[in-house]
Amino acid sequence: MSLRPLGLATEIIDDLKLEVTYAYEDLVFVEHNTFLLQFDDAQKKNFRIYFNVECEAGTAARLEQALSAAAKARECSIENCGRFELVVPEGGSEFQVRFLE
């Protein structure tokens, strides 16, 4: 597997004056967990975006538009793939990401 373009994802997120707070495997977490990006290993210049279930629809639409413009300026694309929630299992200390369609 080749390296994923974390620097490119960071540049796109920086354009919105937001910060990457954590990157793990194919996921990039953004401050406040409003959304996360997932690398698309099949299409290197495509990023999948998932919005937190707590993010309002209007906010998600504005963020998606801004992210798409920032990605397009770098000859990349953003694909809205749905929503996610962070879940901490009972008695657990680590969170899990649950993707919702």
Image: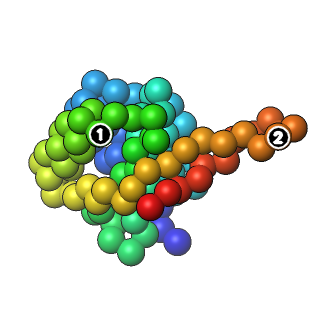
Looking at this view, name the residue that lies furthest to the right.
Answer: 91
x, y percent for residue 36: 44, 44
N-terminal of the two: label 1 or label 2? Answer: 1
Residue type at the position of mark 2: Glu
Q: Position of residue 29 (x, y in %)?
A: 49, 40
Which quadrant of the figure has residue 10?
top left
User: Neighbour class for label 1 at 10 Å: few (<14), some, many (≥20)?
Assistant: few
Relative to 98, 56 lies left or right? left
> Where does the image place residue 25, in percent across and percent down from the top left?
57, 55
In the image, taking residue 71 as reference, residue 92 lies left or right, namely: right
The one nearer the camera, 64 or 15, is 64
* Residue drawn at x 26%, y 55% as measured from the top left: 78
Residue depicted at 59% across the width and 53% down the height? 98
Q: What secondary structure is marked by label 2?
A: loop
- On residue 76, the disc is none
Q: Quadrant of residue 79?
A: bottom left
Viewer can see residue 4 = no
Q: Which residue is mark 1?
A: 57
Q: Which amino acid type is marked by label 1?
A: Ala
Furthest-bottom residue in this view: 42
Res 90 label: 2
Q: Quick one: SS at disc 1?
A: helix
Query: Residue 24 at what x, y percent from top left?
Result: 58, 48
Scheme by which the image is coloured? rainbow
**Residue 71 visible to an observer of this rendering:** yes
Q: Is residue 28 above or below residue 18?
A: below
Mark 1 → mark 2, Cα distance in angstroms: 29 Å
Residue drawn at 39 percent across, 75 percent down: 42
Q: Quadrant of the C terminus?
A: bottom left
Q: Dot 2, how many residues are within 10 Å of its Cα: few (below 14), some (14-19), or many (20+)? A: few
